[in-house]
């Protein structure tokens, strides 16, 4: 198992409702372990298992949900 984190900034999360929608949508992907959203700064972090989901799938899911990604950063964590 290889754990990684992805950090995204989007144009407009849409407050608490949008934050909950993003969290719920990303939680449906296999391999996603946690999603934390900061609606004040339009940012969120996703911790995931790279054997279950790929960076491109995370990005595609976010865009499919109607969010415009302005920044994305990925970090692999080796154990």
Image: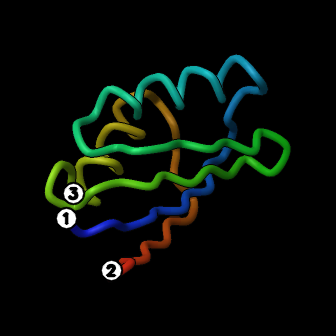
> Could you say whether the residue bearing mark 2 is in a helix, strand or loop?
loop
Relative to 32, residue 19 above or below = above
Q: Which mark is residue 1?
A: 1
Q: In this view, does 72 lie to the left or right of 9?
A: left
- Say few, some or many: other residues with alpha carbon within 10 Å of mark 2 (under 14 / 14 to 19 / 20 or more): few
Q: What element carries label 3?
A: loop
Name the N-terminal-most of marks 2 and 1: 1
Spatial separation of the CA atoms under disc 1 and disc 3: 13 Å
Eyeballing the image, is 12 above or below 43? above
Q: What element carries label 1?
A: loop
Residue under pointer 3? 54
Q: Mark 2 points at which residue?
A: 79
Instruction: Give residue 67's mark.
Output: none
Q: Where is residue 41 in the image (x, y as percent from the top left)?
A: 80, 51
Label 2 or label 3, whichever comes before in sequence order = 3
Q: Nearer the viewer, residue 1 or 26?
A: 1
């Amino acid at each position: 198992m290889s754990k990684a984190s992805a950090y995204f900034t989007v144009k407009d999360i849409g407050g608490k409702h949008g934050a909950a929608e993003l969290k719920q949508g990303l939680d449906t992907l296999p391999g996603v372990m946690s999603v934390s959203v900061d609606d004040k700064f339009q940012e969120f972090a996703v911790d995931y298992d790279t054997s279950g989901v790929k960076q491109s799938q995370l990005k595609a899911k976010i865009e499919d949900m109607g969010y415009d990604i302005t920044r994305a950063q990925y970090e692999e964590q080796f154990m």
